[in-house]
Image: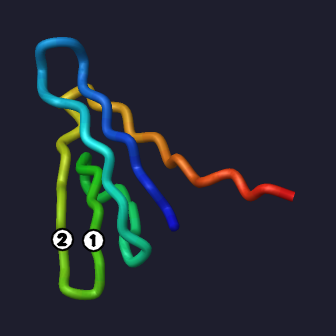
């Protein structure tokens, strides 16, 4: 399941871990957009300075 860790610069916002197998991350006109079949779930402007990292579970084996 894809997970996205959204990290803001210190004092700019709370870090968020988003987990949803149906979310897709796209970049649209300076916005990072996480959306599913129903539409946009979260949009972050590029000027917010946030870092978005995809964190996938490690498979054992």
Q: Going 32% across and 39% down the picture, which residue do you hit?
A: 6
Q: Which mark is residue 35?
A: 1
Please indicate whether residue 59 sits to the left or right of residue 46 in the image: right
Mark earlier in primary sequence (2, 1): 1
Please tell me in which quadrant of the rendered image residue 28 appears: bottom left
In-front residue for pair 49/59? 59
In the picture shown, does residue 7 fall above or below 53? above
In the picture shown, does residue 17 fall above or below 34? above
Render colour scheme: rainbow
Q: Residues within 10 Å of mark 1 (few under 14, many from 20)?
A: some
Q: Which mark is residue 48?
A: none
The residue labelled by disc 2 is: 40
Please indicate whether residue 54 sits to the left or right of residue 35 in the image: right
Please tell me in which quadrant of the rendered image residue 59 appears: bottom right
Horizontal and vertical percent for residue 60? 79, 56
Tell me the SS state at disc 1: strand
Horizontal and vertical percent for residue 58? 69, 51
Tell me the SS state at disc 2: strand
Horizontal and vertical percent for residue 30? 25, 46
Residue projecting furthest to the bottom: 37
Please say if the residues under marks 2 and 1 sit with CB atoms less than 8 Å apart.
Answer: yes
Please tell me in which quadrant of the rendered image residue 42 appears: bottom left
Q: How many marks?
A: 2
Please indicate whether residue 45 sits to the left or right of residue 53 in the image: left
Q: Going 24% across and 18% down the picture, which residue do you hit?
A: 9
Horizontal and vertical percent for residue 46? 24, 37
In-front residue for pair 20/29? 20
In the picture shown, does residue 31 fall above or below 36? above
Cα–Cα span, label 2 and label 1: 4 Å
In the picture shown, does residue 49 fall above or below 28? above
Q: Going 24% across and 32% down the picture, which residue do you hit?
A: 15
């Amino acid at each position: 399941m894809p997970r996205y860790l959204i990290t803001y610069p210190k004092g700019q916002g709370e870090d968020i871990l988003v987990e949803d197998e149906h979310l897709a991350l796209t970049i649209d006109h300076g916005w990072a957009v996480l959306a599913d079949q129903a539409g946009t779930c979260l949009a972050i402007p590029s000027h917010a300075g946030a870092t978005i990292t995809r964190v996938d579970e490690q498979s054992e084996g």
